[in-house]
Amino acid sequence: MSTQKIKVWDLPTRLFHWLLAALVLGAVVTGQVGGNAIFVHGKLGLAIVGLLVFRLVWGVAGSTYARFSQFVPGPDAIKAYLQGRWQGLGHNPLGALSVLALLALLLFQVVSGLFANDDIAFRGPLMDLVGKDLSDTLSGLHKGAFPLILALVLVHVGAIVFYARVKKDNLVKPMLTGWKELPAAQPAVPATAHAQGGGLVAFIVALALAALAVWGASGAWIAPPPPPPASAPATPSW
C-alpha cells in the first residue's frame, strides 16, 4: 500500500529521546550496582539534568509537535481519544500524559539526587545547601521514586508494543527518522501540517540553558569550606 509521509519529529527531539533512554538505563544500572558505580550514577544524573532542561526549553521553542502547547491534552481531547474520535499527529492524548508524567518524575528524581547521600561515600553536589537531615529525607524519596519510574517506562514500552501489534502503527520508526507514514487513502496532508520552527537559534538557546543548568547542579559555584585552623605546636613539658 502506498503511503504519504509527514515530518513530525525534529532532530533535537529525537536525539533527546534516545539519549534520555540511554542515560536513564545507565543511571538505573549504576544505582543498583552501588559501590564505586554510584559516582558514575551521579555524573549520569547531571547529564539527565541537562537533557531535561533542554527538553523544557524545546517544549516552548522547538518545532510544532515538540511544543507542549501542541500536545498537552485537555479533557475534550482525552474524551475524543477514548471514544476513538481523536485524529492528530505527534503524541496522542494518553501518550502525552505519559510523557508529561515521566518528565515530571525524572525531574523530581534528578533534583532530589542532587541533595542526596548514601551515608558512606557519596554526597550529592548540593547536599551542603540543605543539611544532613533534609538530605536523608530526599535520599529516601529518591530511592522510593524508582519503582514509579520503572512502572512508567514499562507502560511506555507496553504502549509501543500494543500500537505496533494491534493498531499496526509503528511509533519507533518516526522517532528514528522523523517521518510518519500515513495511508495514501487519507486526505492529502497540507504542507503546513509538517513540523515547523525550532531553528538553529532556538537550539543554541536551549543548549546554552541546559549547559548552565548542569553547571548549577554540579555545585561548582559553591565556595569550598575554609580549611580547618592549624593546630598550635605542642608546648615542651620541660
Image (spheres, grey):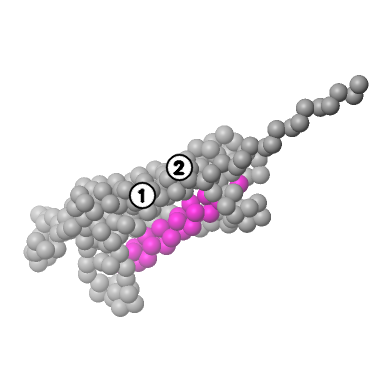
Q: Circle 2 is placed at which residue position?
A: 44
Mark 1 or mark 2, which has the lower sequence index? 2
Magenta span:
93-117
Q: Residues within 10 Å of mark 2 (few under 14, many from 20)?
A: many
| Residue drawn where x is 18% and y is 58% of the image | 197
Q: Circle 1 is placed at which residue position?
A: 210
| Residue drawn where x is 60% and y is 54% of the image | 130
Above or below residue 41? Residue 194 is below
Does residue 115 belong to the magenta stretch? yes
Q: Label 2 amino acid?
A: Leu
Name the quadrant of the N terminus. bottom left
**Is 120 on the left-hand or right-hand side of 197?**
right
Most extreme residue toward the top is 238
Q: Label 1 amino acid?
A: Ala
Q: Is residue 90 or residue 162 the one in the foreground?
A: 90
In the image, residue 233 lies at what x, y percent? 77, 27
Q: Residues within 10 Å of mark 1 (few under 14, many from 20)?
A: many
